[in-house]
Image: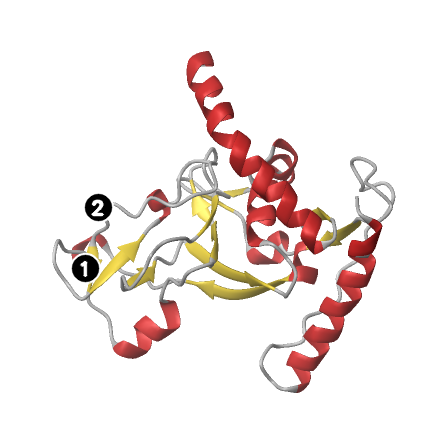
């Protein structure tokens, strides 16, 4: 930790002030306050300049994507259609190959389009795969619409989407998410009202970036090791 970078508590207060400003401007809706994080909930100690927060404290949830049945998906159409299989299985990345295409209005595209830097969360899937996440990168000028099984999320200033993404695919993040899973006959789901309560340990912004960068350096080696063990 570096003292000159401040504390996560200071960062948290800035985020709350930013949220209040956006609420007054009518850009976001005021949400119901969530319970304070108790000592009993905290799974491990963190450095003094870090802070445990709930997902709702740092995120802005934009909603799920557009419904299109299999009969409304084609090899050629106006827009590419990003589905849950385009989020790779707990690597934190996207696979933008071989997407089906759909027709949609301009308004639908504006509402449900995929944008650079979006944080994506898979809300419905099998029990093993629900809760997959990814940060969108390198989509250039492609016109892509999100499927309705994917939640689009952004973060407040000075929160690294890459850091959050790596937390979600970590053993601790996945263990927390498993507690939220609701099963129906064929599908497992994690609903927004549960997701927003997820606890995340937040360091100052520069430290978030350093952690994410270090994980990016090491991740290819861990993936190779996993393949060997399999």
Crowding at mark 2 (Cα within 10 Å: few <14, some 14-19, many 20+): few
Q: Residue at x 21, y 46 (%)?
A: 98
Residue 168 lies in what quarter of the image? Answer: top right
In terms of sequence position, does the residue under pointer 2 or pointer 1 come before the other? Answer: 1
Q: Secondary structure at mark 2?
A: loop
Q: How busy is the neighbourhood of tag 1: few (under 14 within 10 Å), some, or many (20 plus)?
A: few
Q: Position of residue 41 (x, y in %)?
A: 80, 42
Q: Would residue 7 be seen by someone viewing this image from the given angle?
A: no
Q: Residue furthest top?
A: 229
Quarter of the image with the C terminus is top left
Q: Do callouts 2 and 1 mark residues in contact (Cβ within 8 Å)? A: no
Of helix, strand and loop, which one carries label 1? Answer: helix
State whether residue 114 appears in this view: yes
Residue 221 image point, x, y percent:
49, 24
Residue 123 percent coordinates (x, y)? 47, 50
Pair 2/1: label in front: 2
The residue lying furthest to the left in this view is 76
Task: Relative to 213, say whether 192 is above or below.
Answer: below
Q: Which residue is mark 1?
A: 72
Q: Farthest residue toward the front?
A: 4
Q: Quadrant of residue 112?
A: bottom left
The number of numbered discs placed on residues in the rendered structure image is 2
Give the residue at x 61% y 52%: 195
Q: Residue at x 40, y 39 (%)?
A: 88
Q: In the rendering, which numbered label is found on residue 98?
A: 2
Q: CA distance from mark 2 to mark 1?
A: 16 Å
Left or right? Give the position of 146 relative to 224.
left
Image location of residue 84, percent across then percent down: 37, 47
**Hey, which quadrant is residue 17 in on the image?**
bottom right
Tell me what residue is drawn at x 60 percent, y 85 percent: 26
């Amino acid at each position: 930790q570096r003292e000159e970078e401040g504390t996560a508590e200071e960062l948290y207060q800035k985020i709350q002030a930013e949220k209040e400003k956006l609420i007054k401007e009518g850009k976001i809706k005021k949400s119901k306050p969530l319970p304070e994080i108790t000592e009993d909930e905290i799974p491990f100690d963190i450095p003094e300049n870090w802070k445990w927060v709930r997902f709702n404290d740092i995120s802005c949830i934009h909603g799920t994507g557009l419904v299109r049945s299999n009969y409304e998906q084609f090899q050629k159409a106006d827009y590419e259609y990003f589905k849950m299989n385009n989020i790779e299985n707990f690597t934190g990345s996207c696979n933008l190959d071989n997407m089906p295409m759909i027709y949609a209005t301009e308004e639908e595209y504006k509402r449900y389009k995929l944008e650079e830097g979006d944080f994506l969360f898979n809300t419905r899937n099998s029990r093993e795969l629900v809760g997959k996440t990814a940060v969108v990168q390198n989509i250039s000028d492609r016109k892509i619409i999100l499927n309705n099984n994917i939640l689009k999320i952004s973060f407040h200033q000075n929160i690294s989407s890459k850091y959050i993404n790596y937390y979600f695919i970590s053993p601790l993040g996945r263990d927390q998410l498993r507690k939220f899973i609701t099963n129906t006959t064929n599908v497992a789901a994690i609903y927004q009202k549960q997701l927003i309560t997820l606890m995340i340990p937040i360091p100052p912004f520069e430290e978030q970036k350093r952690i994410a960068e270090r994980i990016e350096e090491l991740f290819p080696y861990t993936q190779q090791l996993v393949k060997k063990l399999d």
